[in-house]
Image (cartoon, helix red, strand yellow):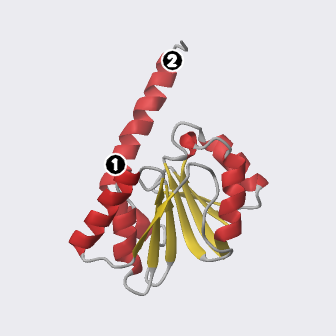
Amino acid sequence: MKRLSHIGILALFKEILFKRWLDKNAFKVLAEIGVGSGQVVLDFGCGPGTYTIPAAKLVGESGRVYALDVDKGALERVEKKARKEGLNNVVRIESSGGEAIPLGAETIDVVLLIDVLQEIKDIGALFSEVRRIVKPNGKVFVFPMHIGEEEAMRLAKSMGFTLEGKKARQVLAFSR
């Protein structure tokens, strides 16, 4: 079993605290990074909808949010939350667990990859698929929890994404 150094433990603790802050402030952060009216958003690995529901509110009725996850129960919770909020612009996509995304080429304005990359077997293949579905000048936002910023940047750049900087202190912003 790998032992963490004191520095490693502190870094992990800091990452967890930031993730909690990010979850609590999802609406504010999504608005700050530019999710807005009429956009089409993919929340890849959406879980219970922590970012899906705020994104759906921000894009409004003229936009759409695809909630993609491998966990059927999580997707059911997303649908329930969307109904409760009166949101009709959330589309559920049940994933097979692979990197393939069942959406057309150049159909997505914004892709959210928040705390999900550590679950992916082939992150390079995922970034390739994300590049396929993102519109020219589309945005990809990554919170690279557990895999490290440098690795996420290397992989995204190798697939032709341009790093625009960080948003909300630790969310990497890329454009196509």
Left or right relative to 87: residue 92: right
Residue 4 - label: 2
Quick one: quadrant of the C terminus?
A: bottom right
Q: x, y percentage for residue 23?
A: 35, 52
Q: Can residue 176 be seen from the camera position used here?
A: no
Determine which residue is flagged by label 1. 21
Disc 2 crowd, CA 10 A, few/some/many (<14, 14-19, 20+): few
Q: x, y percentage for residue 106?
A: 67, 76
Question: Residue at (55%, 70%) from the top-left corner?
Answer: 110
Q: Are marks 2 and 1 in contact (CB under 8 Å)?
A: no
Residue 175, by quadrant, is bottom right
Q: Secondary structure at mark 1?
A: helix
The one of 94 and 65 positioned closer to us in this rendering: 94
Left or right relative to 156: residue 54: left
Q: Secondary structure at mark 2?
A: loop
Q: Earlier in the sequence, mark 2 or mark 1?
A: 2
CA gap between label 2 and label 1 equals 24 Å
Q: Amino acid at mark 1?
A: Trp
Residue 120 - label: none
Q: x, y percentage for residue 99?
A: 63, 52
Q: x, y percentage for residue 168?
A: 45, 56
Question: Residue at (34%, 66%) from the top-left corner?
Answer: 53
Question: Residue at (45%, 23%) from the top-left corner?
Answer: 9
Left or right relative to 133: residue 69: left
Q: 137 above or below 24? A: below
Q: Can residue 23 be seen from the camera position used here?
A: yes
Question: Residue at (47%, 17%) from the top-left corner?
Answer: 6
Q: 12 above or below 97? A: above
